[in-house]
Every structure is written in C-alpha cells, then in structure tokens.
Amino acid sequence: MAKLYHVPLSPFCRKVRLSLAEKKIECELVEERYWEKHPDFLRRNPAGKVPVLRMEGMVMPESAAICEYLEEKHPEPPLMPKGAAARYEVRRLVAWFDDKFHHEVTANLLYERVNKKVTGQGFPDSTNVKAGARAIKYHLDYMGWLLDHRRWLAGDTMTLADFAAAAHLSALDYISDVDWHRSETVKDWYAKIKSRPAFRGILADQVPGFPPPAHYADLDF
C-alpha cells in the first residue's frame, strides 16, 4: 500500500490526497511534524517539506511532480485533458494556486492563524492576516470569471486545476476564511467538487485545538 507523509491542512498534501482518492489508490496517511526536522523524514526529503509519497518502490516529494506521476502511471480517471493547449491551461492554474494564491492568501491566513500556533512560532501577524483577507477577494473574483466562461476552472471537464484550487479553499474553509457569499458561481463549483467521494477524507479531518465550522463538512453548505 502507498504511504503519504502529510499534514492535514496543508493544501499541497490535500491536492495529492484528492488525486489518490479520485484514482481509487489506497494510501496510508502518516502525519509528519516536518518542522521538527527528524532525521528519518529528512532522508525521505532533504527539503524538509510535505507531502512525501512512498509508492511503487519510490519515495517522492513535491506535490506537482507527485500528481503528474500519478496521472502518468494511473491515467484513469484522467485529471489532465488530452490536448497540449488544454494541458497547459491546467498546469498554469495549478501553478497559480500553488504559487500566487498560496503566497498571497494561504500563507497569510492559514499559516498565520494555524501553523504558527501548531509549530510554536508565536502569534499571527495582523498585517499579514489583513493582506490575506484582501487578496482572497481578488482570487475569488478571478475564479468566478473563469467559471462564468467554463464548466470547470480549466475547461469543460474537472481536472487537477480544480483539485489544486479546492485544496487551498478547503483548508481555508476549515478556519472560516472563505466568504462564500462573494460568488454564487464559485460556491456552486465548490459544492459540486466537495460532494465527490474523493473529498470525504478531506472533510473528515480534525485538527486538535481548531474545530471546523458547522458548514465545513455539510455538502449543502
């Protein structure tokens, strides 16, 4: 069985978990306190980051590379479209959420409110939290614009781009940092994607000291 070293609220880990679950690949989840820099974990990934997937005789860090590997080795059901232009758009949006969205929103909200306390790094920086609260509005508006022109974020079919976005938003939703009233289009998209069987494990997550809001696991909000 595959084994994934992860942190429950990490959007990068969640993206891999969603890909594994969608492809019905059984996987044991192992919570990793990566900030403690245990030698065993650093041997798996000298970069000291999660996720790390142990599978098929390989030890694989880096969420984007893991998801591409899963797509190539286990192509059904597909999370990447067939055409080069369509695949480019998926990769562009995955990078958008894992880079721009992460640095402007997730790092300023989730990491400040939760990660600092869990890792013993002190209290949230209010300047960063305010910056994240402003930035998420822009990103939700951009997602709404995309979904006004497409059935899913990258096109007419659900792809890894949707999982990348949902991984970040689900982690932020766990701490009530998503204004679902800002865009009914985005809310409908998220309700649709979180109703998928692959999302069940994500919605069952519990982080000690941080109970989720009542709507978090409610498929109808």
Image: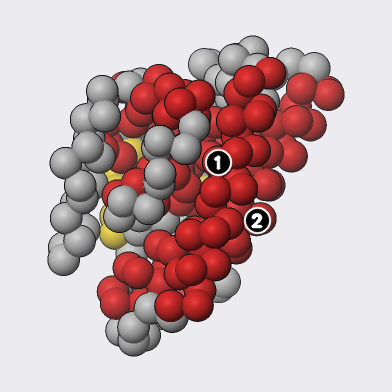
Q: Earlier in the sequence, mark 2 or mark 1?
A: 2
Compare residues 121 and 56 and report the one nearer the observer.
Answer: 121
In the image: residue 111, left or right of residue 96:
left
Is residue 136 shown above or below 181?
Answer: below
Q: Residues within 10 Å of mark 1 (few under 14, many from 20)?
A: many
Is residue 137 shown above or below 200?
Answer: below
Is residue 58 shown above or below 209?
Answer: above
Compare residues 105 and 8 and report the one nearer the observer.
Answer: 105
Count of residue discs: 2
User: Where the N terminus falls, by quadrant?
Assistant: top left
Q: Position of residue 146 (x, y in %)?
A: 66, 28
Q: Position of residue 159 (x, y in %)?
A: 58, 25
Q: Nearer the viewer, mark 2 or mark 1?
A: 1
User: Where the C terminus falls, by quadrant?
Assistant: top left
Q: Quadrant of residue 187?
A: top left
Callout 1 secondary element: helix
Residue at 41 percent of width and 56 percent of height? 10
Asked if residue 59 can be seen in this view, the reply is no
Pick out the residue farthest to the front. 182
Residue labelled with disc 2: 99
In the image: residue 100, left or right of residue 127:
right
Residue at 40 percent of width and 35 percent of height? 181
Residue at 46 percent of width and 26 percent of height? 184
Going by the numbered disc 2, the residue's amino acid type is: Asp
Residue labelled with disc 1: 140
Is residue 186 shown above or below 170?
Answer: above
Compare residues 82 and 45 and report the one nearer the observer.
Answer: 82
Going by the numbered disc 1, the residue's amino acid type is: Leu
Callout 2 secondary element: helix
Asked if residue 118 can be seen in this view, the reply is yes
